[in-house]
Amino acid sequence: MELDHVFVMCDVGAPEAAALHALGLREGSPNTHPGQGTACRRFFFGNAYLELVWVANADEAQTPAVAPTRLWDRWSQRRRGASPFGIVLRGGRAASNAAPTWPTWPYRPSWLGEGQSIEFAQDTPLREPEIIAMPFVRERARAGLEPLDHDFPLTHITSTTCGLDAASQLSAASQALHASGIVSFEPAREPTLRLAFADAVEGKTMDLWPTLPLVLEW
């Protein structure tokens, strides 16, 4: 599996996107999730993308079919200890590595193709990011259709690091991600997400706290 995108829970309408605009990032197409109660704004890179998510319909987000995703819980508790992040993986081109190795449960929203399911990791606490696998996805969403020419050299995400308290006590899914090198975990007083681009060869850093719990390195 490989990184497809990461999401950050934001205020309604994701006004936090202004901080990314100020850096010179070009915004891509927005998206909504019918029946799920969520919507998002997106910023695309060569191999993955960043999604700013909010709950647009609280009733839909808390229906019996959607509630187990904990999207409502993460959004409503994002300032009360819940990690606001999600790590979303795709199957990639290597068929031998296209499925998660940790226990999952299948989520089948109405907008998904017949016979497909989104696999949510089991037994991950809310203080950890949500870990989601889409084995049926082989390439980055909307490849070739979204703007990639940002003012900063933010081309390809080469490392993703999630900061959280008690980083040494991880769920099985987070341990597997850490061992694979897809995502690293480190101790932090507050939930943070560090995205490094092109191996951060220029040695530059932009911390977007407190607008976004996000650090960009290039």
Image (spheres, rainbow, N blue to C red):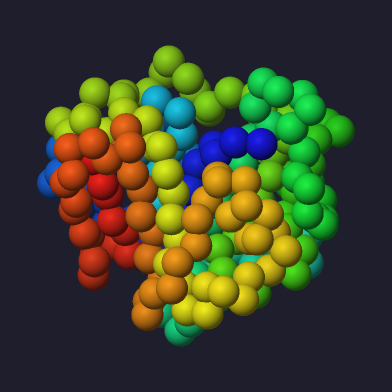
Q: In which quarter of the image is the C terminus?
A: top left
Q: In which quarter of the image is the N terminus?
A: top right
Left/right of residue 20 with respect to residue 81 in the rendered view? left
Toward the right, the furthest residue is 115
Left/right of residue 22 with respect to residue 55 in the rendered view? left
User: Which residue corresponds to the image point at 70% horizontal and 59% vertical from the top-left?
Assistant: 173
Residue 76 in sight in this render: no
Left/right of residue 30 with respect to residue 209 in the rendered view? right
Residue 72 lies, in percent from the top left, at 58, 69
User: Which residue corresponds to the image point at 75% horizontal and 70% vertical from the top-left?
Assistant: 123
Q: In this view, does 114 lie above or below 193?
A: above
Residue 140 in sight in this render: yes
User: Which residue corresponds to the image point at 63% horizontal and 60% vertical from the top-left?
Assistant: 174
Q: Based on the displayed image, in which of its 4 quarters is residue 54 positioned?
A: bottom left
Q: Nearer the viewer, residue 155 or 23?
A: 155
Residue 197 lies, in percent from the top left, at 32, 38
User: Which residue corresponds to the image point at 54% horizontal and 37% vertical from the top-left?
Assistant: 4
Residue 214 lies, in percent from the top left, at 32, 58
Q: Is residue 94 above or below residue 106?
A: above
Residue 115 lies, in percent from the top left, at 86, 33
Q: Which of 212 and 177 is in front in this view?
A: 177
